[in-house]
Image (cartoon, coloured by chain):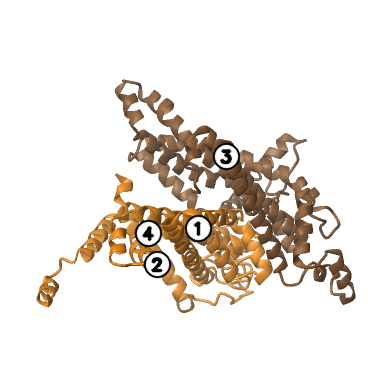
Chain colours: A orange, B brown
Amino acid sequence: MSVAVDALETVPAINPRSRRRRLLWARFLRRKLAVACLVVIVFFVLAGVLAPLVAPFGYKAVDFEHVLAHPSWRHLFGTDYLGRDVLSRLLWGARASMTVGLLATALGMLVAVPLGLVAGYYGGWPDAAIARGTDVMLAFPYVILAILLAAIIGPGLTTAIVALGIAAVPRMLRISRGESKSLREAEFVPAAVASGAGDVSIMFRHILPNMAPPLIVAATLTIPNAIIGEAALAFLGLGIRIPDASWGIMLKDAQSYPQDPLLAVIPGVAIVLIALAFNVLGDALRDILDPKLTR
Amino acid sequence: MTGFLLRKTGAAIVVVLAVSVLVFLGIRAIPGDEATVMSDGDPTAIPYYRHLYLLDKPMPVQYGRWAWLALQGNFGRDHSGIPVTTTIVQRLPATFELATLSLLLAVLLGVPAGVIAATRRGKTTDVGVTGTAVVAHSVPHFWLGLLLIIYFAVDLHWLPATGYVGWSNPVENLRHLVLPVIVLATGVAAGLMRQTRSAMLDSLGADYVRTARSKGLSEWRVVGRHALRNSLITVATLIALDFGALLSGAAITESIFGLPGFGRLGLDAINSRDYTMLQGVVLVTAVIWVVVNLFVDVVYSLLDPRIRLTAVPR
């Protein structure tokens, strides 16, 4: 017995999992656009993480001698109405944007995936109850949610994350419920039952890993919505507050200086670039991870 | 059919009830109640306002009274004493007009674009249309609004930047709505295009399309009569849902363009800390969405009777 196991373990490199992974990587690298998107995303994440180190000025550093300055070597993207360096604020804004984009999506998944698993696995009344709950959530647009939350806990990063996280729940719930429902019929479920696995173990150890591909795609496509939502909430004064930097706040400030359109163009282009990168990457991931959809 | 209707209506009522409880509790959770706001720092006035807003009664009594009056269309009075219902009714026409025009433009752009992309799947046209939709989906509404104002209103002086003129002056009315309609329609059109494209791809791959082709029908007839008609059911549902979203979710666009619409009321209410108003607005927003959904479910089941049998929650 032990001899046989040893023999199996010495067989080199036919681990099917790592082979599959290498195959997926190869498929991904062949798509130049998707790779470019990943580069853009990594760039923005680094900008957010390294903002305190690479930003030439502080995001609050005012310079009343150079107010509304045009781009120059000193201020690559010019300065705003208080003489704050636009490039520095852009980098700090990336930090807020990435934080909210990633955490709101994570929060949405954390709520939606277990509920979807249960709803799809059991069906019946748990499914119906969770569906009604989703209907209730859908009845609150994220701006309304953020308004309520801002009134209760005050505007800020947390308000933006929670409001956008809840807004992301219904879609992810629908996806995980559908996956859980169809995977419940897979052959490995009776096999797991036969080997004595309970419901919880079947759901989380057998079904959950198999729904990873559609969930990865859904998460990638939720992040850009959350990023845009963060900017919108900051713009409305419900998200991150002044004097902190957010692309939404930069746009809010730019609203008062239409004669200086660069102030409105720069943060907006940043939002479109990162949102586009996530959206295109998500579409590409769908094609790569789920080939039956494309053919 | 009656059973289906009853089941759907019952579910909608349960959702509205749950929503109303959540809204009520949400408003109560705000630190500093209505009385604190209204008394304006005068502690002796607080008990008076607590009594006036029933805040001295137990919560279930407060909820019961509010829900009972709300059922009759009475959401109480705002800080200046004007009934909340009056303000909501005044604000609805602008939002309704904005939503209708935006949806119209979005359908005119999105649906044909989706059909064309599907029939030319994989060709340059498809890649171009789909790519445009992804870009449009990645552009924040309010930023697009800002740029349009800067360019068309401030630089070129072609269109007014903000404000709203009633229907008595149709030309000015439309001139004020051009930019906000473009802003709202862009996002909706992008979504409709993608959904129309995928619905069309589904029906173009169906057996009846192969049959139609093998009968020797022209491509035009196959696409128009057979594939499109079968995709329209799905697309129509999505259009209705978009309308619901536009009615309740135009807050940002309305506030950028200074439109006195319903979507903006919530923002106005929180800025003036008018909780009676906020409570009414949030409830009405949610109810609009639930009603639109119920309507969609019913119409969908009329168009496609199979849905009645499988009408377990989606």
Residue found at the very far bottom of the displayed protein:
A53
Pointer 1 residue: A126
Mark 1 touches mark 2? (CB < 8 Å): no
The chain holding disc 3 is: B
Can residue B84 be seen in this snapshot? yes
Q: Secondary structure at mark 2?
A: helix
Q: Quadrant of the N terminus of chain B?
A: top right
Q: Kindly report the distance in space between the C-alpha atoms of the residues bearing marks 4 and 1.
A: 40 Å
Pointer 2 residue: A200
Pointer 4 residue: A37
Disc 4 crowd rating (10 Å Cα; few below 14, some 14-19, many 20+) is: many
The chain holding disc 1 is: A
Q: Secondary structure at mark 4?
A: helix
Disc 3 crowd rating (10 Å Cα; few below 14, some 14-19, many 20+) is: few
* Residue A242 place in picture, x, y as percent: 63, 71
Task: Give amino acid for label 3.
Answer: Gly
Residue drawn at point x = 43 percent, y = 69 percent: A45
Q: Is residue B283 above or below residue A248?
A: above
Disc 2 crowd rating (10 Å Cα; few below 14, some 14-19, many 20+) is: few
Please indicate whether residue B75 sits to the left or right of residue B119 in the image.
Answer: right
Pointer 3 residue: B3
Q: Kindly report the distance in space between the C-alpha atoms of the residues bearing marks 4 and 2.
A: 37 Å
The first of marks 1 and 2 along the sequence is 1
The chain holding disc 4 is: A
